Amino acid sequence: MPKTIPVVLIIGKQNVGKTTLMKQVLPLLKKKGYRVGTIKYNVPSFEIDHEGKDTYSYYQAGADVVSISSPEKLAVIKKVHQKTPSIRDIIRLYHRDVDVALVEGYKKWRYPYIEIRNEWTEKDAGNTSPNALKVTATKDDCHAIPKYSKKALQGIIQFIEAKIK
């Protein structure tokens, strides 16, 4: 029986710091020995293949699935015909060997989540669910990139580890 991979969503409005947080959390989890998968949801679409490349040509010629591999990595491009694959399907197919999947976006799915905002109202901050962690992203006048305190990062790692165990 395959193991269930824990999923933690990273959610928030555009440009609030979701990617920044993921890039800071990933090396901390790796340093602790975890194998981490990431999934990024992008609306309305995305391109990872480029005109002039063989895989692009195969896809444009009608292939339903195109893959490219090397000793280091594997990429798969698959037509999904207007149906967004579920997180579980993506994990089952491509993330079977990780300890946790961090998902940026997919906020309508029901998984434990870390929600990022620039500020919280008293009403918003009141939720104390064990499956939700609310984090504040801070920006200073000199930098447009959000920052997270060391204390916030430690709390985030503890939250994720609680879902892994």
Image (cartoon, rainbow, N blue to C red):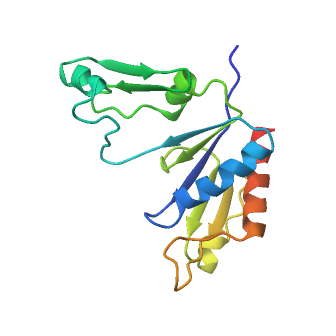
Q: Quadrant of the C terminus?
A: top right
Front-most of 38 and 125? 38
Count the marks: 0
Front-most of 80 and 25? 25
* Residue at 41% over, 21% down: 68
| Image quadrant assignment for residue 20 | bottom right
In the rendered image, the residue lying farthest to the left is 61
Front-most of 121 and 45? 45
Is 139 located above or below residue 148 in the figure? below
Is 121 located above or below residue 82 in the figure? below
* Residue at 35% over, 24% down: 78
Q: Position of residue 148 (x, y in %)?
A: 66, 69
* Residue at 65% over, 48% down: 112
In the image: residue 154, left or right of residue 75: right
* Residue at 73% over, 62% down: 153
In the rendered image, the residue lying farthest to the top is 1
In the rendered image, the residue lying farthest to the bottom is 141
| Image quadrant assignment for residue 77 | top left
Q: Position of residue 154 (x, y in %)?
A: 78, 60
Q: Position of residue 162 (x, y in %)?
A: 79, 46
In the image: residue 127, left or right of residue 162: left
Q: Quadrant of the N terminus?
A: top right
Q: Position of residue 12 (x, y in %)?
A: 51, 61
